[in-house]
Image (tube, rainbow, N blue to C red):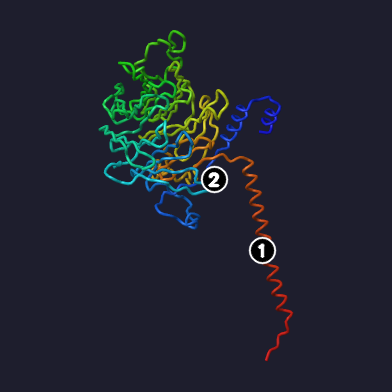
Amino acid sequence: MNTQLFARAIGGIGPETLQRAELERRLYAIQAAPGVQFDGREGQHSPQDDAQEKNASAHQAGVNSIAVDRFEGRYLVSGAADASIKLWDLEQRENVQQDHINQPVAAVKKSPSTHHYGITHVSFYPFDSQAFLSSSYDHSLKMYATETMAASATFDLDSVVYSHSLSPIAHHLLVACATQHSAVRLVDLRSGASTHSLAGHQRSVLSVAWSPHEEFVLASGSSDGTVRLWDIRRSANSLGVLDMDDAVGILGEDGLGKNARKRDRGKAHTDAVNGVVWTDDGKFLVTAGHDERVRVWDMSTGANALSHFGPIIKNSHLSTLLPLLVPSHVLAAGKQVMFYPNQKEILMFDLFEGTLLKRLRVPGVAAASTQGKSGQMNLRHRTTALSWRAGDAGFLSVHSDGAIRAWLPRMQEDVQIEHEEAETAEDSEDESRKRKREALDEIFRNLTKQKITFT
């Protein structure tokens, strides 16, 4: 870092380069922050109770989804398997590195208008953090106001809704929904209509994602192993499928896919695809499947980029599992880092090289505890979702044990400051003990000097 500061001081690099270098340095220093906890118990708790709470639970049941607002990075919404939804203020503490127990600032109260079964996915409205969306196993998609935590709109889709997506750039307000039905369902928030659908998959759709740069382009992953691209403006909506055996792609007239024929056959994975996410520049698509593979696709041609992440990847649950892609402004140009929610750990990869950069162990989860008596995975310790927090150079994870956990950078400077504070506290404690000892010695000396007469 001193080298970067010196280069900036002599004009060798610009302020943006220096900022990227520092953010990237902090990124590689991310680790668990067990002192930052989320306690969803109702009512007020004393500091003594908080001090004794070693593993606070955000929800009584497993947490299935989490979202952080993209404007301030301040508010977090979480949805659980017991249909509970809670809102958290991440700025309840002034110092993000300081240990703290967060408590929800609001929660959805049970009523006939709220979800009846487990939450599958939550997301903030992309243009205003005062609203958020939730989908559920009860076949519905709902929109809530964060101020009142009351449902302002409900859409019944007649089948389980595994996930949903709202474009971060589009003028249209179409919510794409991945449901138990084989067609992608589109819900129009303006008109309230939910009749439009995109047919093409042969089995349930598990994950959907709008392109961050093409407002009418959508990607979807299905339990039939296919990943389809759609343009909702076209009468034949499907743009084709991705093929894992194609490392060249469809080049078209300009070598970048212009006027290229579409591919109608091929599979992205050999098993169900339950994760689809775009890089924030829209140039690449990342997919995750039950074949325990993560694949990266060049979206200019649809080619498999052949990134290989090894046999360490685990993925077997039906629910949506989305890799977390670090925002591009955090990294140097051309770099991309992915965090993958594995069984008992979170894996940090170079997205294009497939290199494992770091293994982040989930605090309080021993390796043996993730296996049941039959050798199968213990679902209580599954990491279900990840969400990046803007401005914090860190992220949050949610788990099937009901916990929300924070992951923050811990720099060498932070460790040094902690050691100095610990040494200062120890010196202060030693000084206090010394004064007490001197006071006791003085009392003893005074007693021994007194003349004692026995009668």
Instruction: Calculate the distance from the C-alpha at mark 2 to the C-alpha at mark 1.
Output: 33 Å
Among numbered discs 2 and 1, the one appearing first in the sequence: 2
The quadrant of the rendering that contains the C terminus is bottom right
At x 52% / y 42%, what residue is drawn?
32
Q: Quick one: which residue is furthest to the bottom in this view?
A: 455
Q: Is residue 61 above or below residue 426?
A: above
Q: Is residue 237 above or below residue 434?
A: above
Disc 2 marks which amino acid? Glu
Q: Answer few, some or many: residues within 10 Å of disc 1's Cα (few below 14, many 20 plus, some between 14 and 19).
A: few
Image coords of residue 391 (percent x, y): 53, 35
At x 70% / y 78%, what residue is drawn?
447
Q: Which residue is mark 1?
A: 433
User: Quick one: SS at disc 2?
Assistant: loop
Image coords of residue 421 (percent x, y): 64, 50
The image quarter in which residue 438 lies: bottom right
Q: Which mark is residue 94?
A: 2
User: Quick one: SS at disc 1?
Assistant: helix
At x 48% / y 45%, what residue is drawn?
366
Disc 1 marks which amino acid? Arg
